[in-house]
Amino acid sequence: MCGIVGFTGTQDAAPILLDGLKKLEYRGYDSAGIAVMDQKTISVNKVRGRIANLCEKTDNGSSVPGTTGIGHTRWATHGAPTEENAHPHLSNDGRFAIVHNGIIENYLALRDELIREGYQFQSETDTEVIVHLLERYYRGNVREALLKTANRLRGSYALGVICSEEPGKIYAVREASPLILGIGIDDNYFASDVTALVAHTRNVIYLEDGEFAELSQRSIRIFDCTGAEIHKKTTRILWDVQAAEKGGYPHFMLKEIMEQPGAVRATIAPRIKNGTVEFEELGALLPELPGIRKIIITACGSAYYAGCAGKYALEQLCHIPVEVALASELRYANPLTDEHTLLIVISQSGETADTIAALKECKSRGAKTLAIVNVVGSSVAKSADYTVYTWAGPEIAVATTKGYTTQVAVLYMLAICFADHLCQLGNDKEERLDTLLALPRLIQQAIDMNPSIPELAKKYHKSKALFFIGRNTDYASALEGALKMKEISYLHAEAYAAGELKHGTIALIDDHQPVIALCCNPSIMEKTLSNIVEVKSRGAEVLALTFRDNQKILPVADDLLFIPNVDALFSTAVEIVPLQLLAYYVAKENGCDIDKPKNLAKSVTVE
Ligand code: AGP
């Protein structure tokens, strides 16, 4: 969603801000802007649409002199994506410019109050109240004005602020929306996402809720919500700049699909030690497992579907009932959780608003909480009792691929680890571990054994609708396969539990209706085969996904996708890969903006 960058130093700010905003494009946005301060003059440039328009408007930044500035990409929430509503916003006296991520929940009341006092509003945004409050509270001290303003705001905000009375300084304020400070040599930075910082520095400081920072060319000072100065540790970002670049691939999504063998290896390999799965992060949780009566997995979108896939392994190996709940529902469902509940929260970004809220809700009701997260230092990681990082590296494409497979891999590992601690693993422990260790190789094979996908995409890309069917673990994979198809190709795609078809959906099956049938789970293979025959006899065109030596499928499928043989309990991490590739190539045929699908954002930080 929205993105923030800030810079102060010796070089011209505008090109650096524009470059930082380009790095944040993947998050999704519909307008952008920068404010640059030259001595005591602030100039603001804003555009609708892409950063390229902003580059054009400012001659790649060269028409905007000044070594201090802030920039923003906006994903519209309050007010249409227009130039007026784009950030930065200026105070009426022109002293302050601000950029904001998040939502100010009490903005209407504040807006009325400020209008009564004579402040003039130029936009429909919730953000604009902040800049007028700053003007109202400013009495020669920016830090004091920031504190007083922050005390009036309810909701979430990451703020970037400049004030013409303090040339060379940029301010960053955080409440429930990420903000990271980047430490340079003769320059300093902030951004809402480390991807905008790594080209300049690997040394960063994560701001916490309630903290704010004052950055100048050579100093960074951080304060708590009372205004007292605090000292925070510096973190070194370990991944390199190339990790956030396309590396010769036409799209980040394709690159990230291809990275999955390596990403899953990085997730699994370091945690298999001494002939078992070891999570050092979970030291204090493991002795408490015998007291756990129920596991709830909660998340949104693909992360929720990862939970649907992991449920089978957790339940079957640990013998603990597992519920999978959408975070947007769970947060308002008065969840029945107590100290005997383990809540597993899954989030690639760690910043998804509903997921954070569901986590807090269940935690306040006594649940033990474990987060599976990719982004280090994110809000979910900080709020949970225990955090397991997926180590997938930066994921830039809006449609998650390696984020999802690594989440699924962690769930498989948790299932084995918990079952081992509960003494539920039998003689097949070694076999289970071998399967886990083989997953990167099997994923690579799933990529290699389907060269026909670009051709199949040509056949299916004009379909009005695609139905994905499967049972059990295949159904979990179907859910994610259909979501991938929808979000990047804009085709209507639905996943159905194959056994449910005859309870209504089969009415939609007609001549040449494509049905993507997942048959990678031998325990229910015969049942799914019957469902395939049912749709075939109503005219459907069946593209079946199955393991290579499955002869039974040949007579009923029109087209085939393959995966290598893999234990069905762990098969989703492998069978999703051809479906990701299919979605990718269908979207390519349809000329879609694959890495930045319309209306979507990478990290959904609003409810
Ligand atoms: C996946 O392709 C989607 N873009 C989306 O469903 C995503 O998985 C969801 O928004 C959750 O995000 P998170 O993992 O960062 O919490």
Image: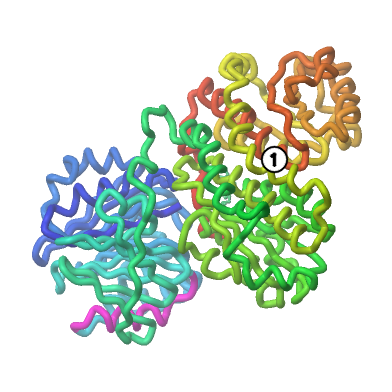
Residue at (27%, 59%) from the top-left corner? 6
From the viewer's perspective, is 576 left or right of 243? right
Residue highlighted by disc 1: 435
Q: Main secondary structure of the magenta part?
A: helix
Count of picture labels:
1
The percent coordinates of residue 286 (x first, y second) are 69, 68
The percent coordinates of residue 395 (x first, y second) are 47, 45
From the viewer's perspective, is 150 left or right of 187? right
Residue at (90%, 36%) from the top-left corner? 503
* Quarter of image, res 535: top right
Residue at (64%, 19%) from the top-left corner? 460
Residue 410, compared with residue 265, is above or below; it is: below
Region in magenta: 140-155
Residue 369, compared with residue 509, is above or below; it is: below
Residue 454, compared with residue 601, is above or below; it is: above
Camera-nearest residue between 181 and 329: 181
Q: Is residue 313 visible?
A: yes
Which secondary structure lies at badge 1? helix
Residue at the outermost left position? 39
Residue 146, compared with residue 584, is above or below; it is: below
- Say what amino acid the circle numbered 1 marks: Thr
* Quarter of image, res 129: bottom left
